[in-house]
């Protein structure tokens, strides 16, 4: 008979929380040890491929399949996370995503005979990381911290959490990538300072400015370019090499996808070598022929300078947004494989006038920081509190299609805000709460996140109801909205769920647009506000005309009211808020006597039956 193991309680090995950098190009998993964070696997390319037998594979093998089985293989899927068909038209022009039919509602990709959503694809990468971690740790891994770009919106964050869940991981926290990088460097240990995190990866560039105070992080601002990175450099080198080959072999291989993929490998190899040696060669052997070209660092630098220059403008914009002068930057952290390039390092140093940190491998920094955060959650690391930032303002729609912002862009999270709103129509028992994200004044120019009805509010004259709206963003950047009728206590709340199918609008574009359109928006807002006020005054006049007191007015007084109403209606749709307001004032004057009569009779009625000495 077998013996049962004795459970001594606390000898059971505790399962570790891992930190994961789920990157566009590459992913990594790390864990917090007694000595500090440690990488658990090699770099896992964020590529997924489906084999002939229908099994999905992820990582280096899948990347090899990009050459042999391009139609069954997908990369850069992070670009599609939490997005809808309308959002990704730009990506489709640049990447060979094969979109499955019926993707109008939920985006799906076709990998050979298999159809998957972006979170399902990402889940395969996460499963591979989970497995690597389990092998390294010798035990099950079920909990993780995953990093996301600071500019990821709610839908993109939610999709990342979904991917974790599909992979069998409980995602305890999403952490912004720049925050993770600063943590990896232990910058939270210093008392205070301003940190710039410059992240140039495979296909994306992000710059973030963080403030540290008493060991607390706060992301002051973020900026970047979602189509800028090592891929652009590869593309430039490819053009040079293809041109060479055309001349040497008298053949254009650019339509031969296998040849192109092999050449891309060769080009990337040369590029990566040039970060360490002054000269490297691009080498291709294909169908018995050989192409070889030596590339010096000088030529390389000249070739890639425009790409590096494109990272500098977002850096300046970010400083401006953070209201930080270059001289105030205390530390600069380099993140992303492409920051190994010497020209990147020197340009960053020149711009920020500070020597960047390069002690850690730039492609490991984010995963290491995620592990530090995991350690904090597990209680292995003390005294660190993280604050992140919301990239776009969040608010609700108010009368006239205007937005009322509750949480402003670049607010630190977790954050909450409460504001009281009222109704616009007498006896209204429902209100529509429409949650929007963006910087513009009019709802139609913002991104719609959620809508819900608050039903069963106490009927009241317009303007009397008190509806409290509360916004709460948790540490993962997920928004909860609650609306509550203060009189009845009726309330309704939503977690803002990913609305796959958002309108196109990258954060940067939205912010830029709001700056460009600021003047126009301000004018539109004034017109809408005047119109909303006109609506209220016209409705009140309509009610007053039904009162018995109306009959006490002279003919002239009545026709003055009619004239004022008509004139207000004539200018109502003009773009001139001053004119609308002038006509509102005119109607106010014309109805003054009527208002007095009604008021007096109301007071009289109220006094009737009241004892004089009361
Ligand atoms: P991401 O965050 O986008 O997933 P990484 O931070 O892993 O990506 O960066 C990947 C990019 O870094 C690729 O374009 C890769 O070619 C580039 N890279 C990696 N090592 C080097 C190197 N030694 N020199 C130049 N570029 C490099
Ligand atoms: Mg990265």
Image (spheres, rainbow, N blue to C red):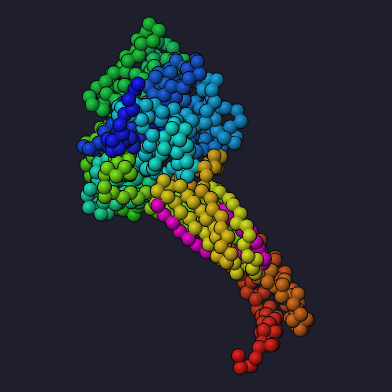
In the rendered view of the protein, which quadrant contains the N terminus? Answer: top left
Residue 560 belongs to magenta span:
no
Q: Is residue 6 above or below residue 608?
A: above
Q: Residue 592: where, in percent of width, then height?
A: 66, 80
Residue at left offset 58%, top offset 32%: 103
Q: Is residue 401 left or right of residue 414?
A: right
Residue visible at 35% across and 50% down in the picture: 387
Can you give x and y, in whole percent of width and height, for residue 452 in the image? Answer: 59, 52
> As rendered, which of 59 and 288 lies closer to the eye?
59
Looking at the image, which residue sits at the far bottom? 613
Which image quadrant for residue 264? top left
Relative horizontal placement of residue 324, taking residue 547 as reference (left or right) = left
Q: For residue 61, which quarter of the picture? A: top left
Of residues 33 and 428, the one drawn nearer to the viewer in this rendering: 33
In this rendering, does residue 512 appear at all? no
Q: Is 517 situated above or below 249?
A: below
Judge from the rendering whether residue 342 lies leftward or rightward of residue 537; answer left or right.
left
- Please say if 450 is above or below 96: below
Q: Quadrant location of the C terminus?
A: bottom right
The residue under the point 45% across, 38% down is 161
Is 419 contained in the magenta span? Answer: yes
Q: Quadrant of residue 376?
A: top left
The furthest residue to the front:
1
In the image, is 349 to the left or to the right of 606? left
Magenta extent: 414-434
């Amino acid at each position: 008979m077998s013996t049962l193991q004795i459970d001594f309680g606390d000898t059971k090995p505790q399962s570790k929380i891992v930190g994961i950098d789920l990157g566009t190009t590459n992913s990594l998993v790390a864990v917090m040890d007694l000595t500090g964070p440690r990488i658990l696997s090699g770099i896992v390319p964020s590529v997924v491929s489906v084999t002939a037998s229908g099994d999905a594979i992820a990582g280096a093998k899948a990347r090899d399949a990009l050459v042999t089985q391009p139609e069954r293989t997908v990369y850069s899927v992070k670009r599609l996370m939490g997005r809808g068909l309308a959002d990704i038209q730009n990506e489709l022009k640049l990447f060979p995503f094969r979109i499955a039919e019926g993707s109008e509602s939920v985006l799906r990709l076709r990998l050979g005979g298999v159809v998957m959503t972006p979170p399902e694809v990402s889940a395969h990468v996460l499963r591979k990381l989970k497995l690597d971690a389990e092998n390294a740790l010798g035990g099950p891994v079920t909990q993780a911290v995953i990093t996301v770009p600071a500019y990821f919106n709610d839908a993109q964050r939610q999709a990342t959490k979904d991917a974790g869940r599909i992979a069998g991981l409980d995602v305890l926290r999403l952490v912004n990538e720049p925050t993770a990088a600063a943590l990896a460097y232990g910058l939270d240990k210093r008392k205070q300072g301003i940190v710039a995190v410059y992240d140039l990866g495979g296909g994306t560039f992000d710059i973030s400015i963080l403030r540290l105070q008493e060991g607390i992080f706060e992301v002051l601002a973020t900026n970047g370019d979602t189509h800028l990175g090592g891929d652009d450099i590869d593309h430039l080198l490819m053009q040079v090499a293809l041109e060479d080959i055309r001349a040497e072999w008298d053949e254009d291989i650019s339509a031969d996808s296998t040849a192109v993929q092999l050449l891309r490998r060769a080009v990337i190899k040369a590029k990566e070598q040039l970060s360490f040696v002054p000269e490297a060669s691009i080498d291709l052997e294909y169908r018995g022929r050989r192409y070889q070209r030596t590339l010096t660092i000088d030529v390389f630098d000249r070739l890639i300078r425009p790409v590096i220059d494109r990272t500098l403008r977002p850096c300046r914009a970010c400083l401006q947004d953070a209201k930080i002068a270059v001289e105030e930057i205390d530390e600069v952290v380099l993140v992303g494989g492409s920051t190994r390039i010497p020209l990147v390092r020197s340009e960053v140093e020149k711009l920020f006038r500070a020597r960047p940190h390069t002690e850690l491998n730039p492609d490991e920094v984010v995963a290491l920081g995620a592990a530090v955060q995991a350690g904090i959650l597990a209680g292995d690391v003390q005294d660190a509190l993280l604050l992140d930032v919301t990239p776009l303002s969040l608010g609700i729609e108010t009368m006239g299609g205007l937005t009322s912002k509750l949480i402003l862009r670049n607010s630190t999270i977790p954050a909450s805000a409460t504001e009281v709103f009222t109704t616009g129509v007498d006896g209204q028992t429902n209100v529509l709460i429409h949650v929007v994200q963006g910087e513009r004044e009019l709802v139609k120019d913002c991104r719609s996140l959620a809508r819900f009805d608050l039903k069963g509010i106490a009927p009241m004259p317009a303007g009397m109801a008190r509806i409290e709206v509360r916004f709460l963003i948790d540490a993962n950047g997920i928004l909860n909205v609650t609306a509550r009728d203060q009189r009845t206590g009726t309330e309704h709340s939503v977690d803002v769920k990913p609305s796959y199918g958002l309108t196109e609008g990258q954060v940067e574009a939205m912010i830029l647009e709001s700056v460009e359109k600021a003047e126009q928006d301000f004018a539109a807002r004034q017109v809408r506000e005047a119109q909303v006020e006109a609506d209220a005054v016209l409705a009140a006049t309509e009610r007053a005309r039904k009162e018995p007191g109306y009959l006490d007015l002279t003919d002239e007084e009545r026709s003055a009211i009619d004239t004022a109403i008509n004139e207000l209606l004539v200018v109502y749709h003009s773009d001139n808020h001053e004119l609308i307001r002038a006509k509102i004032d005119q109607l106010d004057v014309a109805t003054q006597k009527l208002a007095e009569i009604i008021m007096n009779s109301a007071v009289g009625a109220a006094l009737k039956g009241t004892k004089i000495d009361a």
